[in-house]
Amino acid sequence: MGFIGRIVFSIVSNMVALFVASSFIPGFAAAGDFSSLAGASAILAALNLFLRPVLKLFFGPLMVVTLGLFSIIVNGLLLYMLDTISGAVTIQGYQALLLGALVVSLVNVVLHTVKPSKS
């Protein structure tokens, strides 16, 4: 899978993750139609591509001390930025933010483990 294919797969997996999070978590809403959800997932994919490595570098010592659990906080920060940037995603409260970060992370992990391999 090439670079463009990985980006498209990341956008689609983020779209599924946002839909699942908005379906199961009260206070986490992904409103709008398909195109607004696709736009929000593209913004989240861009945040993950450009900002996540910087945040992981900055919070690296905390991630080591907490054995990786601080990555949920990093994912929450990225979802909070998505909430402020995009009007399609609305997160009300810290509990919805942290649960949403957990659900989005789990859905992305599951989808990235079952994606087709290079063949």
Image: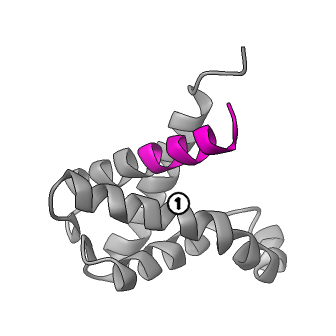
User: Amino acid type of disc 1?
Assistant: Ala
The answer to whether residue 85 is visible is yes
Residue furthest toward the left? 32
Rendered position, 97 above or below 117: below
Specify whether 75 is left or right of 65: left
Residue furthest toward the top? 119
Relative to the observer, which residue lies in front, 48 or 70? 48
The answer to whether residue 70 is visible is no
Q: Quadrant of residue 54?
A: bottom right
Q: Which residues are magenta?
A: 1-13
Specify whether 105 is left or right of 15: right
Mark 1, residue position: 45
Q: Quadrant of residue 71?
A: bottom right
Rendered position, 1 above or below 43: above
Residue pictured at 28% horizontal, 58% vertical: 37
Q: Percent x, y for residue 52?
A: 66, 70
Q: Quadrant of residue 33?
A: bottom left
Rendered position, 76 above or below 16: below
Residue 3: in magenta span: yes
Quarter of the figure that contains the N terminus: top right
Q: Percent x, y for residue 8?
A: 51, 44
Specify whether 75 is left or right of 1: left
Residue pictured at 81% horizontal, 76% vertical: 57
Q: Main secondary structure of the magenta part?
A: helix
Relative to the observer, which residue lies in front, 61 or 6? 6
